[in-house]
Amino acid sequence: MALCVESSARLHLGFYNFYEDGIAYGGLGVAIESPIVRIKVNKCEDFKLVALGDVYLEDVANAVKRKLKVENVCITVEKAIPRNVGLGSTTQIALAIAYGITKLFNLNYSIRELALILKRGKDSGVGIAAFENGGFIVDGGRKINGKVEEPKTLNDIPPVIFQSPLPQNWYFIILIPRGIKGLDELRERYAMDYPRSLPRDLQYELYKLLLLHIIPSVIRGDIKTFGMAVTKLQMIVGTYFSKYQGGVYCCREVEELVKTLLEAGAYGAGQSSWGPTTYGIVEELEKAYVVLKKVLERAYKLNIDLEYLIVKARNRGVQIEYC
């Protein structure tokens, strides 16, 4: 009997803290319904990986196998999230494979224990929390002594300080320019390993956006305030990382798409993680189609080739079943 495990992509909406009082990288994000990762695991004589799509996964699968010290397992990856485009694919794929193996062999690890074994959560706890319970997530960052290092204990994984479902009439327009990759996990270390404090006025602005606008707007279901505040937060975050990614956004394409989304009626827009995935925040599916049509028309004129989809928040975590 095989086990099937399903999880989904996440949008990383930015950081409200970079380095303050020994705490680095408090961040926020949201799990989305698509794209998804779906894997099947079953016992067999020797390790075997079958990836049905074109996403490269061997490094992740081999790392999980090595860390969990399991050889007699067959892994079939039926669907996978594209890598290095800002959707948190590596964390979701690694945790999905590890979680399936854990349940198959009764290894009795929690999701957070698996994250620690796999060294996930170095900079952000959003992906782990998205895998656990989905929805909108704010993590508390992590304690460091000047340099960000791999988690060594469960206390090193950023804790969740706020997690909530998002309304089902909130939609995210997802735009992924083709042929562009964000920073991979090696190159991002130059940007992330030694966080620096912001000027007090900017740090205050980030705290204000999170505590006075973003979290309350989620609780109230106020998409207009949510979108406006996330967009402002994104601009500050993008400016902080501009010397590593060449500007507020990773590339000209994302800059144009964010501008067009806002002009077309999205309540908020930004770049997920290192990009190039771009998102717009809208209310009601009909409105999402109207905004998307305008964006695609503009993208065509600018010769921006992209993939696109309209999704809701995924207000649930990992799903596992016999298959």
Image (cartoon, grey):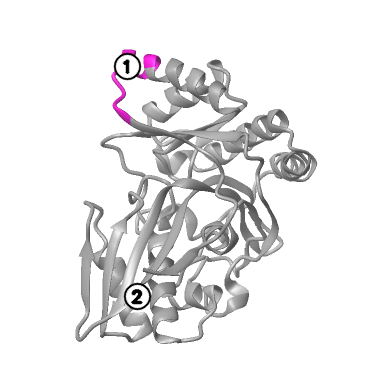
Q: Nearer the viewer, residue 204 or 219?
A: 219
Is 29 drawn above or below residue 170 in the view shown? below
Residue pointed to by mark 1: 300
Residue depicted at 58% across the width and 18% down the height: 265
Boundaries of the magenta span: 297-306
Type of residue at label 2? Val
Q: Nearer the viewer, residue 222 or 211?
A: 222
Residue pointed to by mark 2: 64
Mark closer to the chain start, 2 or 1: 2
Residue depicted at 29% across the width and 58% down the height: 78
Q: Is residue 43 left or right of residue 281?
A: left
Is 307 drawn above or below residue 287 in the view shown? below
Q: Quadrant of the N terminus?
A: bottom left
Q: Quadrant of the C terminus?
A: bottom left
Q: Residue 292: x percent and y percent?
A: 46, 22
Q: Residues within 10 Å of mark 2 (few under 14, many from 20)?
A: many
